[in-house]
Image (cartoon, helix red, strand yellow):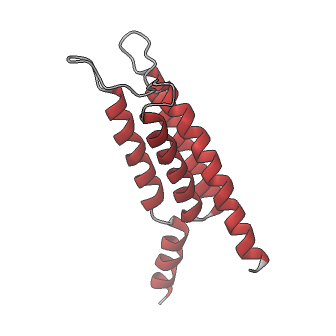
């Protein structure tokens, strides 16, 4: 394995770990509200989107963002289940209550999907310049 390839693998592992940390923090804090405002969900979404955007911009690598996104989604999945002591971090909503857990699940999945699927603008600009020059 070359040094360049090893650097990519290490970057992906660090991104996976960072994503897991953000996923745990977001999953634990997503249900915090201030009155009727879902402050926890907004902050968690901004933080997770910020990490994914930073990875896309700094590494110029879609795979780093995917690794972080998988870490976030894995943390969400693990913390959404019943813990060994019987505790539940993301409970089912009571009838009539707002389903914060469901919204957080789909919101995080959507953020990861958009961040990973976002087109590489540098490549699009280069292609546009080549087409214009021809």
Above/below status of 47 relative to 126: above
Quadrant that contains the N terminus? bottom right
Q: Quadrant of residue 12?
A: bottom right
Residue, x 39% and y 9% (percent of image)? 35
x, y percent for residue 49: 51, 43
User: x and y percent of residue 46 in the render?
Assistant: 51, 36
**7 or 89: nearer the viewer:** 89
Residue 50 to residue 115: above or below: above
Instruction: Choose between 49 and 96: the one closer to the eye.
Output: 96
Residue 130 shown left or right of residue 80 in the figure: right
- Please tell me whether residue 12 is drawn above or below residue 29 in the rendered image: below
Tell me which residue sits at (56%, 64%) in the image: 63
Outermost residue, top side: 35
Number of marks drawn? 0
- Percent across and percent down for residue 104 are 39, 34
Instruction: Indicate the position of residue 134 as horizontal and vertical percent values.
Output: 47, 90
Farthest residue, direction left: 96
Q: Is residue 109 left or right of residue 16?
A: left
Tell me which residue sits at (43%, 16%) in the image. Answer: 33
Question: Vertically, is 98 above or below 124?
Answer: above
Q: Nearer the viewer, residue 19 or 86?
A: 86
Q: Quadrant of residue 21?
A: top right
């Amino acid at each position: 394995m070359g040094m360049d390839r090893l650097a990519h693998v290490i970057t992906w592992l660090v991104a996976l770990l960072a994503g897991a940390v953000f996923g745990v923090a977001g999953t634990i804090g997503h249900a915090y509200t201030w009155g009727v405002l879902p402050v926890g969900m907004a902050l968690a979404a901004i933080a997770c989107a910020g990490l994914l955007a930073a990875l896309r911009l700094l590494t110029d690598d879609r795979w780093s963002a995917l690794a972080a996104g998988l870490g976030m989604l894995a943390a969400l999945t693990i913390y959404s289940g019943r813990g060994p002591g019987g505790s539940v971090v993301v409970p089912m909503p009571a009838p009539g209550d707002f389903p914060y857990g469901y919204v957080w699940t789909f919101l995080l999945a959507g953020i990861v999907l958009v961040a990973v699927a976002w087109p590489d603008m540098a490549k699009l600009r280069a292609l546009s310049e080549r087409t214009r020059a021809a």
